[in-house]
Image (spheres, coloured by chain):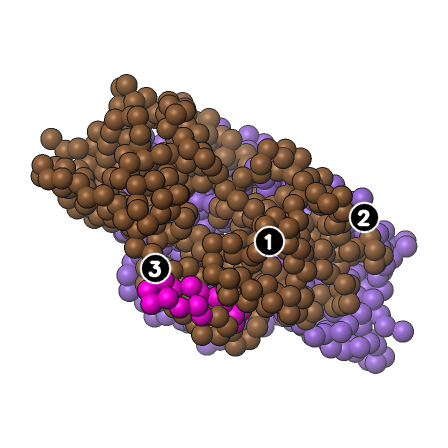
Chain colours: A purple, B brown
Amino acid sequence: MQKRVIIIGGGFAGINLAKCLAGDSQFKVTLVDKNNYNFFPPLLYQVSTGYLDPSSITYPIRNLFRGKKNFHFWMGDLQEVVPQQKKVILDNGELPYDYLIMATGTQTNFFGLEQLKNHAIPMKTLEDALSMRNVLLQRLEAASRIKDRSERLPWLTMVIGGGGPTGVEISGMFAELRNNTIRKEFPELQDAGARIYLVNGGNELLSPMSKKSQEYALKSLQEMGVEVMLNTRIIDYDGEKVSLKNGKYIRSKNLIWATGVTGIIFKGIPSEAYARGNRLKVNEINKVEGVDSIFSIGDSCIQYTDPAFPEGHPQLAQVAIQQGKNLAKNFKKIEKGEHPKAFRYNDKGSMAIIGSIKAVADIPKPKLHLSGFIAWFIWLFIHLFSLINYRNRIRTFYNWSIEYFTKNQDLRLIIRPSKSVARQEIHETKSEKEHSRI
Amino acid sequence: MQKRVIIIGGGFAGINLAKCLAGDSQFKVTLVDKNNYNFFPPLLYQVSTGYLDPSSITYPIRNLFRGKKNFHFWMGDLQEVVPQQKKVILDNGELPYDYLIMATGTQTNFFGLEQLKNHAIPMKTLEDALSMRNVLLQRLEAASRIKDRSERLPWLTMVIGGGGPTGVEISGMFAELRNNTIRKEFPELQDAGARIYLVNGGNELLSPMSKKSQEYALKSLQEMGVEVMLNTRIIDYDGEKVSLKNGKYIRSKNLIWATGVTGIIFKGIPSEAYARGNRLKVNEINKVEGVDSIFSIGDSCIQYTDPAFPEGHPQLAQVAIQQGKNLAKNFKKIEKGEHPKAFRYNDKGSMAIIGSIKAVADIPKPKLHLSGFIAWFIWLFIHLFSLINYRNRIRTFYNWSIEYFTKNQDLRLIIRPSKSVARQEIHETKSEKEHSRI
């Protein structure tokens, strides 16, 4: 009898688990995701700034598992877990499981600031990135039609909340855009005085990285003209004014929210299973504490059992990938009656890019801090080879080469959902629900 | 004093006119378009079927005119023309003109069938194409979750209304998708009996082409498994049933509407200026009849003064391009006090593609009908070199090569507008209006 493995989430963790189990007929693997594609979050900021096409960093899930007879894809949204009956309830059906794996990742954390949530631009999903590209380009177009300088300024002022890798990367990109594309293609906006603010709550940028990398990032961004505000908290945003905790404010129509993430609470999973940041507490083999047959891997879980990481692992791609692979091995061991192997994270280092030819990299073994062009070069190749398939790599390499040599980012299309799409989709959802069945 | 030239519409006609005037300081050229990009309609069907990325067939307008000091871009939507005051009213400002050029193209013609309009999928804009890709992929995913064969069938049945080039091209693409991608990646849909109907009102496909080409297209599509219904009219569609004039109907959730186009009526232009299909009647130099200083070029106009085309020119890219260039020359002649030159269309032939390795081409001088692989090969190169710039060409050539050798179309991402986009846009539109000024 095949074990029914239901994986919720097709990110790094879920895809790697599914890949290791697909083709092994002991398991019947069903991967559930809201989207029909897998995407590569580290390059999302390049989509949002128009340097890469969505298709360069995405791949259709079904294509990845072509020809694997024990693999199934189900496009759907998890509504509830019913551990007593070992089933999940999706928005369009129900699925029974022997093993359930929550690889559900995280979502943007707005820290309960409702008004801010309504006006800020998040940077977590591919939809977010495309939306950001559209909104910012529309703001530039709108600004180009405003003659009054002070009235125009808030349209052009960019505020980035959060000095982690995403915030640093986006700020650097904006600085480049201002110096290249905007200068060349928006003659109306010459000397408009557009400013870029990077607002960070803590005392340093890229907080989990080394002191050296942090200082290099700060200095580089400042040299590029980004105004970095450390020890500064954003407490509200009404779409016009970014309010800071120190009582000051910045007039801006563009707040990019890259301040942090939080896990997702699902109905049916006992609340005791959640730790800080809504992460699911898991044991050394990633089983969720307090429930049977439910596992969690990647950003959605926290594991206190790795001696090198007593506070839990950082929420990084490498942790997710390694946990996915380890869990697959463990399922196979369990089927053979062998003892599963506790997860240990093999730290491969971390890096962040600053603008188009600088980066910082911390490598643990041998202990190394790299910065500048050489770090950028390494960053480039690591990210290129981490892309999911050959075709994405060529496409991305091509885009990057052109961009590097021409300083010309040409993916600046404002593609807005037409009314008919919205209509189709409402219709779709309704009809789909009517036809739901297992 | 510079002549203020306002061009409404950045399609083939408008862009070619603007290109010929940009750089000539006698003119101050403002190009107005709803979108910030120019796109290549002949390859739209490849975007809608997931064979090409939107960025392969589009290009940002501002980038095309980089460095041209007398060129301005205004992203906006024409609301009204005020010929008495020589100005246009846009949704976000007003612009005065010395010459106004309506290069406004056409829109999908639903022949007043309101219910059909609400449910059918049009194929005219880039948004339409992306929407079609999203909707059809969602239908496939939905179908993959339905176990009952007869209940599932309408989700998989494709009906294409209209046997012109778009209808023929889309039908051929669907036949290929069914035989390749769907067979390989949707194991749930094996032998589901998905059918493709091409419904055409007239007695032949590709009606303006030669008899030979028409017959070849029909035979090829039939061989690929497309059910071609000639002399058949669609009279209604409720999202579930395509009703035909002969009293029969087809159960399908997917009706692609490629039946025809119509011009757009603008407020302020006298109704006498419009001819059949809402096309603006123009004289031999493309000036709209009955109004001063207003011109029309491309699909939006009709010209009865070309001896070789007494009924008006066909609505083709080549006509639009040639009219745009001719009008630019005439503006320059008029400025020099010379006599403008009447427009004469130089027919370069027409072609249509059927599936991925067959096409038909009619070439007038020397009179030639080509079909099959050789016509496809010519089609490929003509379209590749018609793409607006080098970068689009490389990108498209790359995509096509991969597709040709792997039969693997991988641009199957369902990217849906997120709620936050919609919110941003409402906000945007409101704020933009508040700030409108000239």
Q: Are marks 1 and 3 in contact (CB under 8 Å)?
A: no
Residue beneath label 3, please?
B348
Magenta stretch, residue numbers: B355-370
Residue beneath label 2, please?
A435
Earlier-in-chain disc, 1 versus 3? 1
Task: Please name which of the two marks, 3 or 2, marks the residue nearer to the observer.
Answer: 3
In 3D space, how far apart are the residues under numbered discs 3 and 2 (Cα atoms)? 51 Å
Residue beneath label 1, please?
B203
Which quarter of the figure is the N terminus of chain A placed in?
Answer: bottom right
In this view, the residue in front, A145 or A400, is A145
Kindly state the secondary structure of the residue where label 2 is placed: loop
Q: Is residue B343 left or right of residue A49?
A: left
The residue at the point 62 percent across, 38 percent down is B117
Task: Please name which of the two marks, 1 or 2, marks the residue nearer to the observer.
Answer: 1
Q: Please provide percent x and percent y for residue B14.
A: 32, 43
The residue at the point 81 percent across, 48 percent down is A435
